[in-house]
Image (cartoon, rainbow, N blue to C red):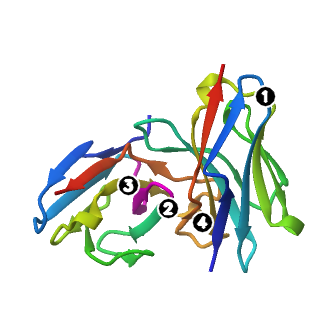
């Protein structure tokens, strides 16, 4: 079975802490994504990466950075956590569309982050 | 810019009744359209997708959706609801052939199924 694994299901951090959310996929996918999910707002794209060391800003990148040193791992970094970053964070991966036009996103189970 | 609008944050149906979840999209280029489902404490799973082939798309668990360009809609239906269909459903759009699968999601519709 294909798998996207997020390192923590629940995380509680304090304001100002540096926070790392880790995501690993075992499908040799080129594309990886970080979304945040908030009630009434749906999923919003934070950052995505289409190759190792490559990254692109999504719709809400402010306050976040990412790292992709290896193809299978995509990390989301909150440099200085704030209470408005309390949210569910979802990682996803996919093959490049032109490699397989029927490809889809595979999602991890999410990390519920609470910043106090 | 692309966007999707899902009408109704909550939809309630009885078991056995028709399920209809509405999605309207906005895109300046021919879109790819998706429906994803999220069960409690899980990530999202793909239900079905439209990629400019047949306008009526069949997905998993008996769901289907019809692409109507004239109405810019991609509504999700199921003839007979089951208790296990209770979940949150997201419509999403992307520009066709971008290679990045950068999806724009709607705000979601929570489906409640009563006995």
Nearer mark to the viewer, of 4 and 2: 2
Residue A56: x and y in percent read 39, 77
Which chain does the numbered disc 1 sit on?
A: B
Residue drawn at x 80%, y 66% is: B72
Residue A78 is left or right of residue A57, and the answer is: left
Same chain for mark 1 and mark 4? The answer is no
**Residue A101 drawn above or below residue A106:** below
A75 vs B90, nearest the viewer: B90
User: Could you give the CA–CA distance between mark 4 and mark 2, rounded to whole angstroms?
Assistant: 30 Å
Q: Which residue is mark 3?
A: A91
User: Could you give the CA–CA distance between mark 1 and mark 4, rounded to whole angstroms?
Assistant: 39 Å
User: Magenta segment, which residues?
Assistant: A27-40
Residue A91: x and y in percent read 38, 54
Nearer mark to the viewer, of 3 and 1: 1
Residue B115: x and y in percent read 66, 19
Residue drawn at x 62%, y 80% is: B1
User: Could you give the CA–CA distance between mark 3 and mark 4, rounded to whole angstroms?
Assistant: 21 Å
Which chain does the numbered disc 2 sit on?
A: A
User: Could you give the CA–CA distance between mark 1 and mark 2, rounded to whole angstroms?
Assistant: 28 Å
Residue B30: x and y in percent read 75, 72
Q: Which residue is mark 2?
A: A41
Same chain for mark 4 and mark 2? The answer is yes
Mark 4, Cα crowd under 10 Å, few <14 / some 14-19 / many 20+, is few
Mark 3, Cα crowd under 10 Å, few <14 / some 14-19 / many 20+, is many
State which tag comes first along the sequence, 2 or 3.
Answer: 2
Q: Are marks 1 and 2 in contact (CB under 8 Å)?
A: no
Same chain for mark 2 and mark 3? The answer is yes
Q: Which residue is mark 1?
A: B17
């Amino acid at each position: 079975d294909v798998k996207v694994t997020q390192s923590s299901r629940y995380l509680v951090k304090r304001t100002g802490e540096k926070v790392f959310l880790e995501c690993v996929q075992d499908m040799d996918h080129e594309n990886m994504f970080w979304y945040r999910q908030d009630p009434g707002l749906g999923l919003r794209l934070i950052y995505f990466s289409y190759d190792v060391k490559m990254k692109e800003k999504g719709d809400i990148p402010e306050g976040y950075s990412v790292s992709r040193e290896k193809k299978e791992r995509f990390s989301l970094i909150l440099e200085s956590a704030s209470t408005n970053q309390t949210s569910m964070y979802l990682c996803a991966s996919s093959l490049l569309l032109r490699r397989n036009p029927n490809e889809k996103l595979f999602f991890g189970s999410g990390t519920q982050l609470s910043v106090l | 810019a692309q966007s999707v609008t899902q009408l109704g944050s909550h939809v309630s149906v009885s078991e056995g009744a028709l399920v209809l979840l509405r999605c309207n999209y906005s895109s300046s280029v021919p879109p790819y359209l998706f429906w994803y489902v999220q069960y409690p404490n899980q990530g999202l799973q793909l239900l079905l997708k439209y990629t400019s082939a047949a306008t009526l798309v069949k997905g998993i668990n008996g769901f289907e959706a019809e692409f109507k360009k004239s109405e810019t809609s991609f509504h999700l239906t199921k003839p007979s609801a089951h208790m296990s269909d209770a979940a949150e459903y997201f419509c999403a759009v992307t520009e066709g052939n971008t290679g990045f699968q950068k999806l724009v999601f709607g705000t979601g519709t929570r489906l409640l199924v009563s006995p």
